[in-house]
Amino acid sequence: MFLSKLTLDPQHPQARRDLGDAYEMHRTLARAYAPDALTPPPRFLWRLEPSFHAFSSSSLLVQSDVPADWSVLDPMRGYAAEVLGNKPVDLEKLIEAGARYRFRLLANPTVTRDGKRYGLSKEGEQLAWIARQGEKHGFSVLACVRGSSERIQSRRGNTGQRIIIQTVAFEGTLEAFDSEPLRLAVRNGLGHGKAWGLGLFSLARIS
């Protein structure tokens, strides 16, 4: 697995456009994984990290199973102030049963009722969702703080259909009790909306 960190300049016109529209951001990042616009890229996850100043640089994390070719950004001079590309991560060494981790996740918590998927907007429901994810994916949530909870607007694929997605930021600590499903959760992401910058499940070991 590979992690990249991009520092974008919001004063750059295309960076500003991408930062304002998750669909456009995904399209730009996909160019680092596919040779042309007609070739579907392999799976990758990304997350825009919180920024507290409107005009400060913005950090973007990108995770993939294959290395990215960030030279595709070179023609957009000034788009990225810094690119730290393709840091290898060994999930076999990182994730072990019994170990504890800090985690960060920006996700789309949902529930399915009568065949339809609904976003969860109440804090209690959202925290219950992350606990259920742990039960399914080999970890126990020890502590969790729900950060921002908001709805974002974007569009779906080439249809241009406008969509609204409920997003929630989670940070906390967890303990792994089954390493293999947790590795898969990190590799594949959690929840829906991954093309819109959701689901990247970041872990840092603490014990």
Image (cartoon, rainbow, N blue to C red):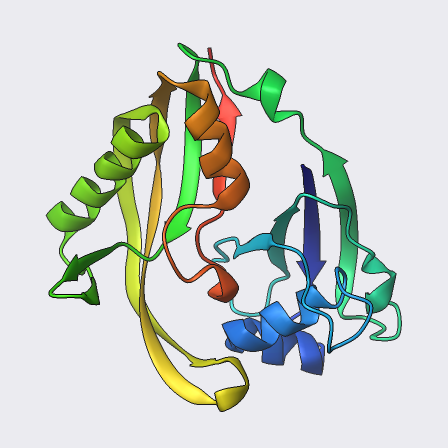
Using the image, determine if residue 110 lies above or below residue 186.
Answer: below
Q: Where is residue 117 in the image (x, y as percent from the top left)?
A: 22, 65
Question: At x 51% / y 64%, what residue is drawn?
Answer: 195
Residue sticking out furthest to the bottom: 160
Please identify the quadrant where the N terminus is shown: top right
Residue 110, picture quadrant? bottom left
Toward the viewer: 56 or 160? 160
Toward the viewer: 49 or 73? 73
Q: Position of residue 160 (x, y in %)?
A: 48, 90
Question: At x 81% / y 70%, what residue is drawn?
Answer: 78
Using the image, determine if residue 124 lies above or below residue 118.
Answer: above
Residue 53 visible to an observer of this rendering: no
Question: At x 26% / y 40%, what residue is drawn?
Answer: 130
Q: In the rendered view, does 110 fall on the left or right side of 1?
A: left
Q: In the rendered view, does 155 fall on the left or right side of 78?
A: left
Q: Position of residue 90 (x, y in %)?
A: 66, 25
Q: In the rendered view, does 110 fall on the left or right side of 16?
A: left
Residue 130 visible to an observer of this rendering: yes
